[in-house]
Image (cartoon, rainbow, N blue to C red):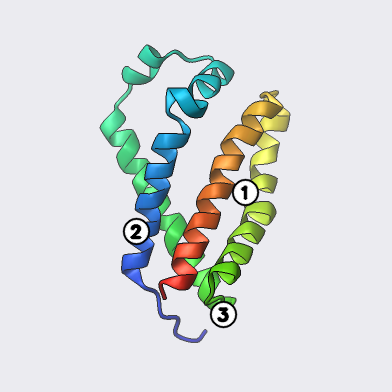
Amino acid sequence: MPQVHINYGAVVVAALVSMILGAIWYAPPVFGNVWMQLIGKKPEDLRKGAMPQAYAMMFVAALVLSFVLAHVIRWANATTAIGGVKVAFTMWIGFVLTTSAGGFIFEGRPVKLYWLVNAYQGVTLVIMGLILAVWA
């Protein structure tokens, strides 16, 4: 396999952008109240958990996602904003929407929750793809 140049600064920035987007997306005035209702939780239920550890784990997950997406973008030779968006959108449709469907189908979770969670993932991937393709 040929050597692929990855801009690690772009990987970290894309992961940070994902975290910021998540904080906005899941804020109560945006989609947070709807999300909590769909998962059957109240704000105080979420505060009971180990939030610093949860955010740390999510940041690690965002870093891994960003790192892998950076490789796919390089392999696809996507060096423009549109190219990065196309690769990321394709990954979202091909991997995120499909692999998360089983959990919703077999767990009987609401379709609205499926789209709320996966729309966040799609927007995140598209923004990451744009950053990673342009900031080579």
Tell me the kind of residue under disc 1: Val
Q: Nearer the viewer, residue 46 or 134?
A: 134
Tell me the kind of residue under disc 3: Asn
Image coords of residue 47 (percent x, y): 32, 19
SS at badge 2 = helix
Which quadrant of the view contains residue 105? top right
Q: Residue shown at 70%/23% (left/top)?
A: 108
Q: CA distance from mark 2 to mark 1?
A: 21 Å
Which quadrant of the view contains residue 11? bottom left
Extreme residue toward the right, this view: 105
Q: Which residue is mark 3?
A: 77
Residue count near mark 2 (Cα–Cα under 10 Å), binned few <14, some 14–19, many ≥20: some
SS at badge 1 = helix
Image coords of residue 71 (percent x, y): 49, 71
Tell me: 86 left or right of 41: right
Q: CA distance from mark 3 to mark 1?
A: 22 Å
Q: Residue shown at 50%/56% (left/top)?
A: 127
**Which numbered disc, 3 or 2, marks the residue that appears first in the sequence?**
2
Q: Residue shown at 56%/75% (left/top)?
A: 78
Tell me: 60 left or right of 97: left
Give residue 13's mark: 2
- The correct choice, above or below, for 23 with respect to 39 in the image is below
Q: Nearer the viewer, residue 28 or 111?
A: 28
